[in-house]
Image: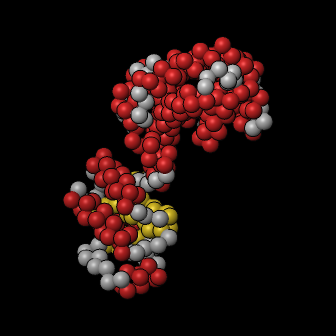
Amino acid sequence: MDFEQAGTTMCAGLNASELLALYRLEATDLARVRNYGQIVLPRVDESIERFYTWLESTPEYSRYFSDADKVHSVQALQRQYWVRFFEAQIDDDYVARRRKVGQVHARIGLELQTYFSGMNVALSIFTEDLYDDSLDPVEYAVTVRAVTKLLHLDTSLVVESFSAVTNRQLSEQSRAMMEMSTPVTALWNDILMLPLVGIIDSRRAQEVMSSMLARIAETRSKVIILDISGVAVVDTAVANHLIKITKATALMGCSCTISGLSPAIAQTIVELGIDVGDVKTTATLRDALADAFRRTGTLLQCAN
């Protein structure tokens, strides 16, 4: 975990008072931010012009700001952002609005690196380009420190909500992919099949088990075939996952057959000393289907 991630984790869910304490922003700091705002806010439009002069040199500009109306709309929002920043009235509404900025950035796909560099440029514009040398050096130094602390608080809130949205999107995508990769199919009356492809880890094994048990409960099937011919590696962990799955299906009154055991996988299981117990296995899917038909009496039904 890097410094920025650590700061984001620390501020997650905190209210305004807690955040002010965390970032050691005292009343004197906020007063200095407000006083400095009286110097730079009359030139806030100039700050935005300078910012967009820099932004136009970045690859992101053409990606996000190709439409002139959109540019004007975003500039108006930025103006509101900085006006509120230099008002330095830090309450829960202020915090909520900053978190919303992160949510918007995440939804449009803006890179965090672009956001960080943009905030760095904005800080430089406000504390260097627009500064009128009206403060004595010591007061200027502590004022810039106060402005920087508040900017760090803002940044942490944006990153916090950005990360939350991004993680939620990734989780939803992962869940969708997992559902797509565990399609339990009804082959025949009372017979289900689930082909597994790729790598099986603890999380995927749990998803497989949940998917299978739900389908068994839905269809009241008596046999399910778990075909692992597409599984890349079968080690002790994978074998144990498969054994747990077969035991869980048995508790549902459904017999599970694992098909697709290659000679290499069979040899690996033996070499690892894995006890497969009463788990039913077959070398091919065809053998598993034939056994499933016998168990359910499907062949007799077809003959009649």
The residue lying at 75 percent from left, 32 percent from top is 54
**Residue placed most toward the observer, 5 or 197:** 5
- Quick one: quadrant of the C terminus? bottom left
The front one of 35 and 134 is: 134
Q: Position of residue 240 (x, y in %)?
A: 32, 70
Q: Quadrant of the rendered structure where residue 53 is?
A: top right
Residue shown at 63% from the left, 17% from the top: 39
Q: Is residue 57 above or below residue 131?
A: below
Q: Give x and y (percent) for residue 222.
A: 28, 58
- Residue 79 drawn at (x, y percent): 63, 18
- 155 and 243: which is toward the camera: 155
Q: Is residue 19 visible?
A: no
The residue depicted at 67 percent of the width and 23 percent of the height is: 133
Residue 228 coordinates in the image, percent (x, y): 44, 68
Q: Is residue 252 visible?
A: yes
Q: Reply above or below: 60 against 190.
A: above
Query: Picture quarter containing residue 94?
Result: top left
Q: Is residue 43 above or below residue 148?
A: above
